[in-house]
Amino acid sequence: MTVTAYTLAVALDLFCLFLGYRFLFQPGPAAAGYGVPADPRGDAGAYLSVKGLRDGTYGVVGLLLLAFAGAHAEAWFMLGVALVPLGDTVNVLRNGGAKAVAYGIHFATAIIILISAALLFLV
């Protein structure tokens, strides 16, 4: 179970780094994949950059916690971070995005993060 817990945590942290990169360097496609398309050339560009920095930072902090503070610290971090995709679910639904994206991507991500936290608490 230890290998599964660490593997899932590292995969989620790396996925956050990927999302951060995508929102910083490919903001248009990233926003469309998020579920609420935005024009990165307009005012939305700054917000997409903020999202990229946020997601990338979550990935870095998660990896640092796992490497230097251990599984339980990462588990608590994951519990807190699970609020982000839950909020993203609401954001997509409130802004006319597809329910399939809201629930199939964002809500499912929150569930996977919570599973990861539970596994890390068991390590």
Image (cartoon, helix red, strand yellow):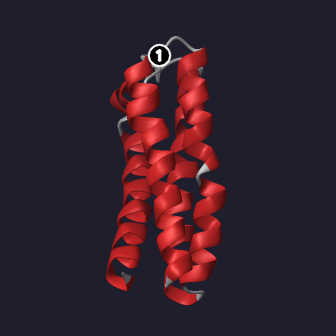
Residue 98, above or below 20: above
Relative depth, front residue between 48 and 34: 34
Residue 111, above or below 34: below
Which residue is tagged 1? 97
Determine if residue 34 is in view: no
Relative side of 73 to 103, left or right: right
* Number of on-image labels: 1
The residue positioned 60% from the left and 80% from the top of the image is 72
Relative side of 51 to 26, left or right: right
The residue positioned 33% from the left and 28% from the top of the image is 29
Q: Which image quadrant: the N terminus? A: bottom left
Q: Residue furthest top?
A: 96
The residue positioned 59% from the left and 32% from the top of the image is 47
Q: In the image, residue 114 lies at what x, y percent?
A: 53, 57
Relative side of 54 to 20, left or right: right
Amino acid at pointer 1: Gly
Q: Secondary structure at mark 1?
A: loop
Relative depth, front residue between 41 and 16: 16
User: Is the residue marked by circle 1 packed among few (<14), some (14-19), or many (20+) residues within 10 Å?
Assistant: some
Q: In the image, residue 103 lies at what x, y percent?
A: 45, 30
Determine if residue 107 is in view: yes
Q: In the image, residue 53 lies at what x, y percent?
A: 55, 50
Q: Quadrant of residue 15?
A: bottom left
Q: In the image, residue 70 lies at what x, y percent?
A: 55, 86
Residue 89, above or below 82: above
Relative depth, front residue between 88 and 55: 88
The residue positioned 60% from the left and 87% from the top of the image is 69
Relative depth, front residue between 95 and 42: 95
Q: Quadrant of residue 13?
A: bottom left
